[in-house]
Image (cartoon, rainbow, N blue to C red):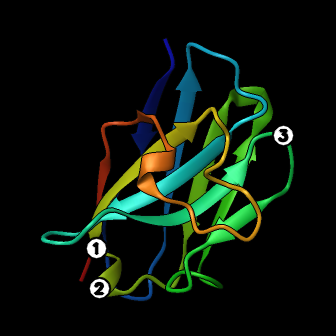
Amino acid sequence: QVQLVESGGGSAEAGGSLRLSCIHSGGPYAGHCMGWFRQASGKEREAVATIFTGGPSTYYAASVKGRFTISQDNAKNTVFLQMNALKPEDTAMYYCAADYAPIGCRVGRTPQPDDYNIWGQGTQVTVS
């Protein structure tokens, strides 16, 4: 059974940085989509960044492009989200998710939460 465990959330000042990690265990890592989503209070869950575990294909939401970077360490089955130049509007619960279909990281397609069927417990990011 695949499990995703996030870490690295916390508080930061505007302009600061945080790095989130997501460890994938219990199943094959290669050949599917991994994504970071976030949900702010009172808002819908949205895709932040996605990556295909088998290659370099990535997606970034317009609101984070140029500030956030998604990367992976295939040897450690871990996905990272480096968040720089943080803004108060980045405050949210951040979730790691996996899509084994995979359709959630197809080039030219905006990832949707419904594409992803395995989720971590989330890690809070607060920017002030």
Question: Residue 39, image x and y in percent?
Answer: 28, 63
**Which circle, 3 or 1, is nearer the viewer?**
3
Seen in the image, is 74 located left or right of residue 69? right
Separation of disc 3 and disc 1 at Cα? 30 Å
| 119 lies left or right of 25 | left
Instruction: Name the kind of residue labelled 3 in the image.
Output: Gly
Q: Secondary structure at mark 1?
A: loop
Q: Nearer the viewer, residue 53 or 85?
A: 53
Residue 25 quadrant: top right
Q: Position of residue 56 (x, y in %)?
A: 85, 55
Q: Does 52 sit above or below residue 81? A: above
Q: Considering depth in this image, is 54 or 104 the residue closer to the camera?
A: 104
The residue where tag 1 is placed is 91
Query: Which residue is labeled 3 in the image?
Result: 54
Q: Secondary structure at mark 3?
A: loop
Q: How many marks?
A: 3
The quadrant the C terminus occupies is bottom left
Q: Position of residue 13 (x, y in %)?
A: 32, 82
